[in-house]
Image (tube, rainbow, N blue to C red):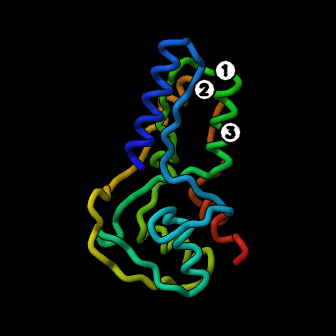
């Protein structure tokens, strides 16, 4: 999975360099929103919301639930794509995510989702998986400098409300 993403990233940059193509590589963090189907191993925010709302036990893998991920709402990411399409650049690479303002640990997410749903979370803690990172917060300053009219429409609070509103 990681190798194929890296290969696509490099091919895109190389074609832009060689042929002058206006291409962009977006390296997103945790993409989420009401329609995200979070699963046990991917999309922890949507999966926590689903587990809490359904009364299911959530499995925390490692770091005692203190691992942090930033969250970007799918609409904010689509809006970033729109801004790029309006004025594409040649072979640019953008890290794009929610940044520090939309960052949350697993344990913090439980508290926010419990508050939003008025339901208590249940979880078990397992050892971390090989390759997991404790901290994954993306710096979007390069994209912002190239596209200053782009901005987030969803705060972390808005994202929590949105993922908790999905019908089960």
- As measured in the structure, the alpha-carbon distance from the residue carrying label 3 to the one carrying label 2 is 11 Å
Residue indicated by mark 2? 147
- The local secondary structure at tag 2 comes to loop
Point out the tag, 1 or 2, that comes first from the N-terminus. 1
Q: What residue do we see at 46% from left, 33% from top?
A: 9
Viewer-nearest residue: 75 or 152: 75
Q: Please give left or right for residue 101 compared with residue 119 in the image.
A: left
Quarter residue 62 falls in: bottom left
Residue 87 marker: 1
Quarter residue 139 falls in: top left
Crowd class of label 3 (few under 14; some 14 to 19; many from 20; radius 10 Å): some
- The local secondary structure at tag 3 comes to helix
Q: Is residue 57 above or below residue 88?
A: below
Q: Which numbered disc, 1 or 2, marks the residue closer to the eye?
A: 1
Q: What residue do we see at 61% from left, 81% from top?
A: 53
- The local secondary structure at tag 1 comes to loop
Q: Quadrant of the C terminus?
A: bottom right
Q: What residue do we see at 49% from left, 82% from top?
A: 121
Residue indicated by mark 3? 79
- As measured in the structure, the alpha-carbon distance from the residue carrying label 1 to the one carrying label 2 is 9 Å
Q: Please give left or right for residue 84 compared with residue 134 in the image.
A: right
- As measured in the structure, the alpha-carbon distance from the residue carrying label 1 to the one carrying label 3 is 13 Å
| Residue contact at pointers 1 and 2, CB within 8 angstroms | yes
User: Looking at the picture, how far across and down is residue 21, in whole percent?
Assistant: 58, 17
User: Looking at the picture, how far across and down is residue 146, in whole percent?
Assistant: 56, 23
Q: Please give left or right for residue 3 compared with residue 118 in the image.
A: left
User: Looking at the picture, how far across and down is residue 60, in whole percent?
Assistant: 38, 74
Viewer-nearest residue: 112 or 140: 140
| Residue contact at pointers 3 and 2, CB within 8 angstroms | no
Point out the tag, 1 or 3, that comes first from the N-terminus. 3
């Amino acid at each position: 999975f990681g190798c194929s993403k890296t290969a696509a990233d490099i091919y895109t940059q190389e074609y832009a360099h060689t042929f002058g193509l206006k291409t962009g590589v977006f390296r997103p963090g945790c993409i989420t929103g009401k329609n995200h189907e979070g699963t046990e191993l991917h999309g922890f925010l949507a999966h926590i919301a689903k587990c809490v709302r359904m009364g299911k036990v959530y499995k925390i893998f490692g770091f005692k639930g203190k691992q942090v991920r930033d969250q970007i709402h799918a609409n904010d990411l689509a809006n970033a794509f729109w801004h790029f399409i309006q004025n594409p650049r040649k072979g640019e690479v953008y890290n794009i995510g929610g940044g520090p303002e939309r960052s949350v640990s697993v344990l913090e997410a439980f508290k926010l989702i419990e508050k939003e749903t008025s339901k208590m979370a249940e979880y078990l803690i397992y050892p971390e998986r090989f390759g997991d990172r404790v901290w994954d917060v993306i710096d979007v300053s390069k994209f912002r400098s190239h596209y200053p009219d782009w901005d987030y429409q969803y705060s972390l609070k808005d994202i929590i409300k949105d993922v908790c509103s999905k019908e089960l």
